[in-house]
Image (spheres, rainbow, N blue to C red):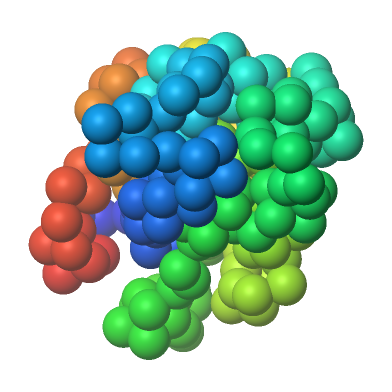
Amino acid sequence: MTYKNILFDLGGVLIDVDVRSSLVAFARMVGASTDNPYPNSLSEMVTEEGLLGGHTSELIDQYQVGTISTDDFVQELLAQCRPGTTRQQIIDAWLAMLIGIRPEKKALLQRLIAQGKKIYVLSNINDLHVQWTLEHCPELQAAERLFFSNEIHMAKPDPRCYELVLRETGINPAETVYVDDLPANIEAGRQAGFQCLHAVDDSWMSQL
């Protein structure tokens, strides 16, 4: 594979995630039980697919393109939780899914940069996760550009996301490898002309 640039997704690619940690935390805050895991409409607001970027939650979709604020997002979730639940508990539950960049992925980034490859990021993300990422993943400071959906106000697989990256960076998609874990995003990347690696497991790392 010949390339000069790598365009990375974050969650599920560079940053390991465990959505179950967030789902369990939210379930506790609504008084969930084995028989009734989500006793109210929170089940439609916080879904596993939505947390993984599958666009099954309108609330999450709005938050990740920045059409609602963090305060609005937290208040929407807080309204579904048991009395006494705090704003910080909501935030902690929302952040619980984020694990971080494993040492072998940090080493991969270092190797690619040492080889002169240019690193870019295009992520469907939200304000709270951006803040956590910038604080806990200093390796990303080496990236040429970070494109966050909540800042560009659109989300993958919208073709305009890829058009924006190409327009603002000037990179050649034929010389760029795009790594993502969602099939719809990979297909959109192919349509934009990128070389693509589908991150279904860690095998993509050995191909860079």
Figure quadrant of the C terminus: bottom left
Q: Is residue 27 left or right of residue 153?
A: left
Q: Is residue 38 visible?
A: yes
Q: Nearer the viewer, residue 70 or 114?
A: 70
Q: Residue at x 55, y 37 (%)?
A: 30
Horizontal and vertical percent position of residue 108: 35, 78
Q: Is residue 188 left or right of residue 55?
A: left
Figure quadrant of the N terminus: bottom left
Q: Is residue 181 left or right of residue 95?
A: left
178 over 142 or under it: above or below? above
Q: Nearer the viewer, residue 69 or 157?
A: 69
Horizontal and vertical percent position of residue 64: 65, 30
Q: Is residue 177 left or right of residue 164?
A: left
Q: Nearer the viewer, residue 36 or 101?
A: 36
Horizontal and vertical percent position of residue 140: 61, 69
Number of numbered tags placed on the structure image: 0
Q: Residue at x 45, y 24 (%)?
A: 39
Q: Nearer the viewer, residue 102 or 96?
A: 96
Q: Is residue 65 visible?
A: no
114 over 112 or under it: above or below? below
